[in-house]
Image: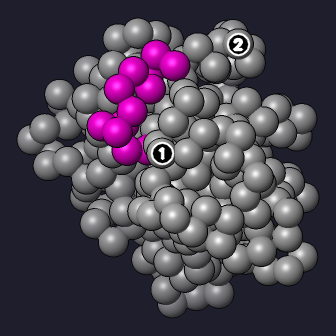
Amino acid sequence: MHARAVAATTTALLGAAALLLPAPAALAGAERPTIIAHRGASAYAPENTLAAVDEAAELGISWVENDVQRTKDGELVVLHDDNLKRTTDVEEVFPDRAPWKVKDFTAAEIAHLDAGSWFGPGYAGERVPTLEQFMDRVELHHQKLLLEIKNPDLYPGIERQTLKVLGNEGWLDPDHLARRLIVQSFSADSIRTVHELKPAVKIGFLGTPPVADLSWYATFADQINPSYSSISTDYVASVHEFEGPHGGPLEVFTWTVNDADTARLVGGYGVDGIITNNPDVVRDAFPKG
Ligand code: G3P
Ligand code: CA
């Protein structure tokens, strides 16, 4: 049996035991999956802001996920929704600009918006960061970035542009490529484009493709990153059977797991990473790193 399959089987058994036993005893010896702070530590600070990156760092979390889109004048910014309503005060500042799409606002306009007050008064004045600003903060903390290209169909050429920013920021050197950067998307076309433009970049596909299709995904993706509710021990084991473009077995980073019991459950499935709004809770669900 492949070493990873042995580990997954062991972890699965321990994960099943975790349902019956106190966590530390049940998972003693099991490997803690990589913990990724979803939109930063977004349970504790406004998502996709520099404050959420800082909060992840303060919690000791090295991996941060974000969502990248593009403004009207071509700046890459970090925001989840395709519009600015939920996470900024755009409706107050620009009442006549419905439906407040990111792509219809300039970077300067977006830079004036308050992206923190919706979360809590202590975050008033927090801004929507540009991708450069976000990466600078991740670099400042010596963290790692799981970068999601969000809604790529709205932004033709965003893959090449994202790679240009990554290069300008020094994130396409061997160290970042090997250990500190993954680019993911729900769009297979988008991540295939990234792979073709820069084959050295590690790639994740967001979704749960049928096992029969995994050999195709393995031609350009190193990870299959599904919703936790869509997977099982068998599915994770099937993904691990395939080898990605950079040589290792395909990995599974699952999302979005925000409580300890579910974290232990998917840990038992053998996932490689857990994407979470509560990275401290998920980390502490496992006895060791
Ligand atoms: O990284 C996984 C997760 O972010 C995908 O869903 O909607 O939060 O971008 P969403
Ligand atoms: Ca995302």
Q: Is residue 96 visible?
A: yes
Q: Does dot 2 land on a helix, a strand or a loop?
A: helix
Q: Quick check: 69 left or right of 235?
A: right
Q: Position of residue 278 (x, y in %)?
A: 68, 71
Residue type, label 2: Asn
Instruction: Note whether 107 is above or below 198 in the view shown.
Output: below
Task: Tell me the residue at 35%/26% (across/down).
Answer: 156
Residue 173, x across and y down, in percent? 69, 10
Q: Is residue 111 magenta?
A: no
Q: CA distance from mark 2 to mark 1?
A: 26 Å
Is residue 81 shown to the viewer in this render?
Answer: no
In the displayed structure, does residue 14 sit left or right of residue 48?
A: left
Asked if residue 157 lies in the magenta stretch, the reply is yes
Residue 2 drawn above or below residue 233: above
Write down the residue under mark 2.
168
Residue drawn at x 39%, y 66% as measured from the top left: 228
Range of magenta residues? 150-161
Amino acid residing under circle 1: Asp
Q: Nearer the viewer, mark 2 or mark 1?
A: 1
Across and down, in percent, residue 76 comes to 59, 33
Residue 60 against residue 241 in the figure, above or below: below
Please give the name of the residue rendered at 85% of the width and 63% of the height, measured from the top-left corner.
Answer: 125
Q: Quadrant of residue 58?
A: bottom right
Instruction: Write down the residue under mark 1.
Output: 104
